[in-house]
Image (tube, grey):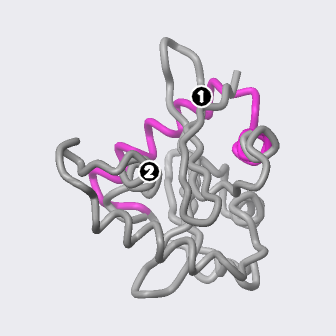
Amino acid sequence: MVSRPLGLLVLVAAAGLSATGVAPALAQDEEIEAMAAALKDTTFTLQDGIKASEREGQPISAQFEIDDGKLQISIYTAKGDDFAEVVADPKTGAVVKTEKITDTDELSDAADQKAAMAKSKTSLVEAADAAVKENAGFRAVSIFPDLRDGHAIAEVTLLQGTTAKKVTESLD
């Protein structure tokens, strides 16, 4: 996954602020526009990508991203004590690669996501479906689980055209 989660990127751009909260976020707006354009003719959903990754382990987070100018879905999975990044092609749904996560920061994020999913009674697919259902016309573009006050939640970033918003779904 990219070092800067799309969820944060989308939220910052939607608010029209930079990461510091002071200046317009032109780069983020351009990235949102690029994501919207890349998704325009894509019928494959984030939820489809999550389902495709299940053979590699338990999905613990997912996001659409543009890597080297190409749209893909990146899903973190956990299997035992190992973590992997599964990349799916959003046009075919096929898993195009699976790589073991070795970066220290990514391993820390994956461990936190796994801990949140361990307390979850709801899957990422169900949480993304609920967020989309509650926000007609939007599609899920990222989902990241977390623990808040001991409860599992998922932060879901939604996109409709170039309008983005972030919602929180309970995983309890």
**What span is colored magenta in the figure?**
101-130
Which sits in the foreground, 139 or 78? Answer: 139
Above/below status of 144 relative to 31: above
- Residue highlighted by disc 1: 153
| Magenta span contains residue 105 | yes
Q: Residues within 10 Å of mark 2 (few under 14, many from 20)?
A: some
Q: Quadrant of the N terminus?
A: bottom left
| Magenta span contains residue 151 | no
Which sits in the foreground, 7 or 124? Answer: 7
Who comes first in sequence, dot 1 or dot 2?
Answer: 2
Which sits in the foreground, 67 or 95? Answer: 67
Marks 1 and 2: which is nearer the front? Answer: 2
- Residue highlighted by disc 2: 14
Q: Given the image, on which type of amino acid does mark 1 rest?
A: Ile
Horizontal side of residue 6 vs 86, given as left or right: left
Residue at image position (50%, 86%) is 70
Give coordinates of residue 152: x percent, y percent.
59, 24
Marking on residue 134: none
Give the dominant element type of the magenta stretch: helix, strand or loop: helix
